[in-house]
Image (cartoon, rainbow, N blue to C red):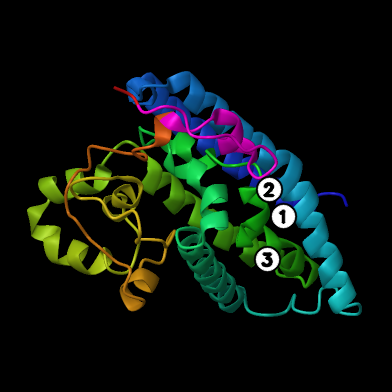
Amino acid sequence: MNLSYEQQMLGTVVFIVFVSAFLVELFSGRIHKGDRPWRDGVFTLTGLMAHVLLSGPVVGTLSGLAAVMLFPSSSGALIAVNFWLAFVFLFVAQEFCHYWIHRYAHTWRWLWKLHRTHHTAENLNVGVLYRYNVFWVLLLPQTWFGGFAIYLGLGKPYVAAVLITYFVNVLTHTAFRWDLWLREKMPFSEPFWRVLERVITLPDTHHAHHAYGKGAHPNGNYAITLFIFDTWFGTAKVPNQKQHKFGLPIAKRLHWAEELFWPIIKKPLGPKSE
């Protein structure tokens, strides 16, 4: 299946945003702060390749074929639907699905092993966006929604919804704690932040999700953008502080091949460090 105009545009914007953010962090010295920057770089590159080779071609094609099979006479049927109505529906639906997939990934052991690679980074930066087990990309709801949305004529609102999610994802994974900086510089805005942090995911809550130790909340704060789902479903924790330890205590004992290719490759834990 050939890529649609919407898919090409989405891919181009995502690539430009990611490369720009990555270069800013790289030249500011943020990327090199981790203990294993080369390993982190290989993991990020592998995740990017998984998106290119699996996410679009496989998931995009399968979801498109499913749309044709389920709605054989409905190509472009929703093209007249109001843009903003379609945007809100797609955005909320994708966020809701991702919240639950992410939550179950921290609950079900087999799903955790697919997701775990995203959490073994010992330095949080935008490169972690693509730090994946290669098979994790097959589960991302945004891609599954794409085939249906584009087939039904909702390509533009779909692209807008995915880009909003992606921009927030970049802003919450970055090593720059811009949220704490703004709150410090503008103390008068604190009431605004107190409301916003319960509705929208900020670096404070997502950094806590990737951390362990003081100020951490790894088994919660699952929402990508709409943190209100965490608030509603009782998985929210707002630490209002900078986190200092990221990753997993067993991160250095995990074999790189299992991290990237489980369940195809399974390896025992390495020895504990002295």
Mark 2 crowdedness (10 Å alpha carbons): few <14, some 14-19, many ≥20: some
The reply to whether discs 3 and 1 touch (Cβ–Cβ < 8 Å) is no
Residue type highlighted by circle 2: Met
- Does 121 appear above or below 190? above
143 sits to left or right of 270: right
Instruction: Give yes or no for residue 11 being in the magenta stretch.
Output: no
Per the image, label 1 sits on a secondary structure element best described as: helix
Per the image, label 3 sits on a secondary structure element best described as: helix
N-terminal of the pair, mark 3 or mark 1, is 1
Q: CA distance from mark 2 to mark 3?
A: 16 Å
Magenta stretch: helix, strand or loop mostly: loop
> Which region is colored magenta?
253-272
Residue type highlighted by circle 3: Phe
Query: Which residue matches tag 1?
Result: 6
Q: Is residue 186 visible?
A: yes
- Does 175 appear above or below 189? above
Picture quarter containing residue 274?
A: top left
Q: CA distance from mark 3 to mark 1?
A: 13 Å
Q: Is residue 29 visible?
A: no
The reply to whether discs 1 and 2 touch (Cβ–Cβ < 8 Å) is yes
Query: Which residue matches tag 2?
Result: 9
Q: CA distance from mark 1 to mark 2?
A: 5 Å
126 sits to left or right of 110: left
Instruction: Give yes or no for residue 270 being in the magenta stretch.
Output: yes
Query: Which residue matches tag 3?
Result: 145
Residue 240's spot in the image, x, y percent? 17, 54
